[in-house]
């Protein structure tokens, strides 16, 4: 199966089809056929949801009929139902997703205790612990009703063990990298942990799907240059092209325009398109072209689907109908590139030109973040406090996140009373933008502020 999976992640479906025809084991054939359609739908966008569902419904029955009670088949069924749940969730069919996750969880639990050291068990244990441990309400509550529970820390440990057990550069190894990479992208809070993962796995010898995942992880921690070799590589893979174009906007480079336009031409789905429109509009705005800025902002507005968190944020900011301040926008892009010193210099040089309250709120937030990453906690606190004081009526994320980051700094300085104060301010100011993420981070900080059981 490893060879076939390798073709999946290379997105080489002609070779995978040819290899599938040679597999006589009906269980493996059915499993791999559904797996391939999952990758074709969710990554390559070469088949529709209905086509995927047709393959799933046909081959899942074959897998059930073929020695259904075998432990090996239970693992395969669990994984396939998990994939179906992911696709349903991606398509915003939340209740259907929970139904498929429930089936997947049930199959896994049927065989979990029988073969604890099994590789499949480690993989599924990692996935379920991370998935269930991070479900938003009301889905986490629904999961609790049917006996789900999750442990994020154990999820990472199990997926890391699963990766270590695979041989390099084969299908199962690539799969383990993808599962762990997406877990770091979606659930990890420890930036040093993410950095270490990227440094170990940013080779251009890996499939472009995995290279793009590494670059997304690097963007999460504001260190795209960890993947400099990937940023410089030639590619026909749309997501990688989008990420390269995004970096060029952050670098204030004229090459951003043709790269992002190439992505928009190649990408068949709406994945990352709204965000690409957003970055392209910013590129034009920074170069004084307000007409094309508005054209690409309007392109966001007319889309009918915003599949990724980046796309949803692009739509949210578009709905604000506010043209960004050029200096704040430039500082934002430089910060996201990891150029904290330059970003802070840009901000400090324009303080007298920041007039509106909303811009001043953002100014203090962004300067606070720069000083936080430059390890100047006192200056960071000054600006976070200013942002909180000014942002009580703002509907943006700047004030609640400033209160959250101030809480972390006070905890680091062992100033518990101040940490409690800003923890409460973060709760009060949490206004909807990034609401769930802020709640999650506050939940992790609560015991540090008040201790267990308080």
Image: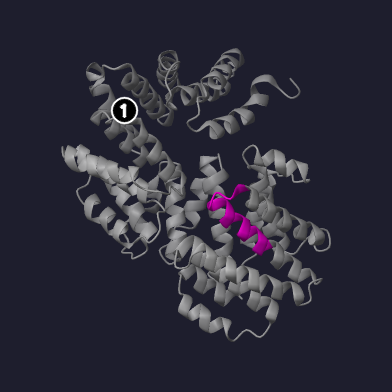
For residue 65, above or below residue 413? below
Front residue of this view, candidates 387 and 147: 147
Q: Assign the magenta stretch its main secondary structure.
A: helix
Q: In this view, does 79 lie to the left or right of 278?
A: right
Tell whether position 34 is magenta: no
Check disc 1 and report its element: helix, strand or loop. Answer: helix
| Residue 382 location (% of width, % of height) | 41, 16
Q: Which residues are drawn in magenta? A: 79-94
Crowding near pointer 1: few (<14 within 10 Å), some, many (20+)? many
The residue shown at (46%, 70%) is 10
One can see residue 289 in this view: yes
Quarter-wise, where is residue 26 in the image?
A: bottom right
Q: Position of residue 400 (x, y in %)?
A: 49, 23
Is residue 172 visible in the rendered image? The answer is no
**Quick one: quadrant of the C terminus?**
top right
Q: Is residue 85 a member of the stretch shown in magenta?
A: yes
* Corner quadrant of residue 136: top right
* Residue 362 horizontal side relative to residue 352, left or right: right
Residue 430, placed above or below residue 96: above
Q: Nearer the viewer, residue 126 or 408?
A: 126
In the figure, residue 65 lies in which quadrant?
Answer: bottom right
The residue at 58%/69% (across/down) is 54
Location of the N terminus by quadrant is bottom right
Q: Where residue 200 sits in the image (x, y, percent)?
A: 50, 56
Is residue 129 left or right of 417 when viewed as pictured?
right
Residue 214 x/y as whole percent = 46, 54
Residue that mark 1 sits on: 344
How many discs mark residues in the rendered view?
Answer: 1
Between residue 233 and residue 38, name the one nearer to us: 38
What's the residue at 45%, 15% (across, down)?
392
């Amino acid at each position: 199966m490893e060879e076939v999976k390798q073709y999946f992640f290379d997105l080489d479906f002609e070779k995978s089809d040819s290899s599938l025809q040679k597999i006589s084991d009906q269980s493996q054939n059915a499993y791999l056929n559904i797996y391939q359609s999952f990758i074709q739908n969710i990554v390559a966008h070469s088949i529709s949801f209905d086509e995927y569902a047709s393959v799933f419904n046909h081959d899942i029955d074959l897998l059930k009929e073929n020695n259904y009670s075998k432990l090996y088949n239970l693992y395969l069924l669990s994984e396939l139902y998990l994939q179906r749940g992911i696709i349903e969730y991606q398509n915003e069919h939340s209740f259907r997703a929970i139904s498929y996750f429930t089936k997947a969880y049930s199959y896994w639990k049927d065989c979990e205790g029988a073969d604890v050291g099994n590789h499949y068990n480690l993989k599924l244990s990692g996935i379920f612990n991370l998935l269930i441990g991070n479900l938003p309400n009301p889905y986490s509550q629904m999961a609790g009703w049917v006996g789900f529970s999750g442990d994020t820390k154990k999820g990472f440990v199990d997926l890391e063990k699963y990766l270590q057990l695979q041989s390099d550069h084969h299908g199962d190894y690539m799969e383990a990298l993808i599962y762990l990479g997406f877990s770091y992208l979606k659930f990890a809070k420890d930036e040093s942990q993410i950095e270490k993962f990227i440094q170990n796995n940013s080779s251009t010898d890996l499939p472009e799907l995995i290279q793009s995942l590494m670059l997304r992880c690097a963007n999460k921690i504001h260190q795209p240059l960890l993947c400099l070799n990937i940023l410089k590589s030639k590619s026909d893979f749309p997501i990688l092209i989008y990420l390269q174009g995004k970096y060029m906007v952050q670098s204030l480079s004229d090459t951003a325009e043709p790269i992002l336009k190439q992505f928009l031409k190649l990408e068949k789905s709406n994945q990352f398109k709204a965000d690409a429109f957003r970055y392209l509009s910013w590129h034009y705005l920074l170069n004084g072209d307000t007409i094309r800025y508005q054209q690409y902002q309007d392109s966001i507005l007319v889309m009918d689907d915003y599949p990724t968190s980046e796309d949803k944020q692009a739509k949210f900011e578009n709905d604000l109908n506010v043209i960004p301040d050029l200096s704040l926008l430039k500082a934002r892009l430089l910060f996201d590139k990891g150029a904290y010193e330059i970003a802070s210099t840009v901000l400090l040089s324009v303080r007298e030109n920041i007039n509106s309250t909303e811009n001043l709120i953002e100014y203090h937030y962004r300067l606070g973040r720069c000083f936080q990453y430059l390890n100047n906690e006192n200056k960071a606190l000054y600006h976070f406090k200013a942002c909180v004081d000014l942002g009580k009526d703002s509907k943006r994320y700047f004030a609640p996140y400033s209160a959250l980051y101030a809480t972390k700094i006070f905890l680091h300085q062992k100033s518990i009373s101040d940490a409690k104060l800003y923890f409460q301010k973060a709760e009060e100011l949490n206004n909807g933008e990034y609401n769930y993420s802020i709640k999650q981070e506050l939940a992790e900080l609560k015991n540090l502020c008040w201790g267990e059981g308080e």
